[in-house]
Amino acid sequence: MRITGLIGAYGGDPMAVTYPNGDQVGYVTVASECELLSDPAPDMDEILELGWFSREAIAAVPRRDWIDRVIRDAPHRAGGDAAR
């Protein structure tokens, strides 16, 4: 995979979580636009499953609310689908 651009950096209230034990954390993530250089394959450790979906189909995929902002910020490419 080759990183071809920056989509955005995300943090703040949308990325804050309070766990059932009362622990509070604030996540920060950076989303990058990438180009695949070979066929993707899950590593079966952190990634168990891969799938590609049209932007319209992502509405039916379970996800955190902040993911929708990343999708809106991501460039639209002809024939391009978003990965999960």
Image (cartoon, rainbow, N blue to C red):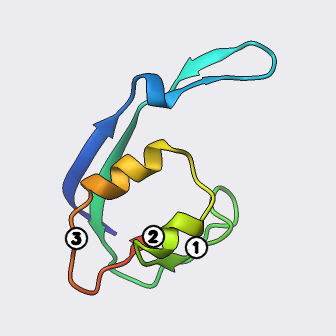
The image quarter in which residue 78 lies: bottom left
**N-term mark: 1 or 3:** 1
Label 3, label 2: how far apart the Cα atoms are: 13 Å
Residue topped by disc 2 = 83
Q: Around disc 3, counting alpha carbons within 10 Å, would you say few (fewer than 14), some (14 to 19), or many (20 or more)?
A: few
Amino acid type, label 1: Leu
Q: Circles 2 and 1: CB distance less than 8 Å? A: yes
Residue at the spot 40% in from the left edge and 23% down from the top edge: 12
Q: Around disc 1, counting alpha carbons within 10 Å, would you say few (fewer than 14), some (14 to 19), or many (20 or more)?
A: few
Up the image or down, 77 lies above or below 45; here it is below
Residue at the spot 58% in from the left edge and 53% down from the top edge: 63
The kind of secondary structure element at disc 3 is loop
The kind of secondary structure element at disc 2 is strand
For marks 1 and 3, give the one nearer the viewer.
3
Q: Around disc 2, counting alpha carbons within 10 Å, would you say few (fewer than 14), some (14 to 19), or many (20 or more)?
A: few
The kind of secondary structure element at disc 1 is loop
Up the image or down, 24 lies above or below 81; here it is above
**N-term mark: 2 or 1:** 1
Q: Is residue 22 left or right of residue 50?
A: right
Viewer-closest of 69 and 7: 69
Residue topped by disc 1 = 50
Viewer-closest of 64 and 24: 64
Amino acid type, label 3: His
Residue at the spot 42% in from the left edge and 52% down from the top edge: 68
Q: Which mark is residue 76?
A: 3
Is residue 74 shown to the viewer in this render?
yes
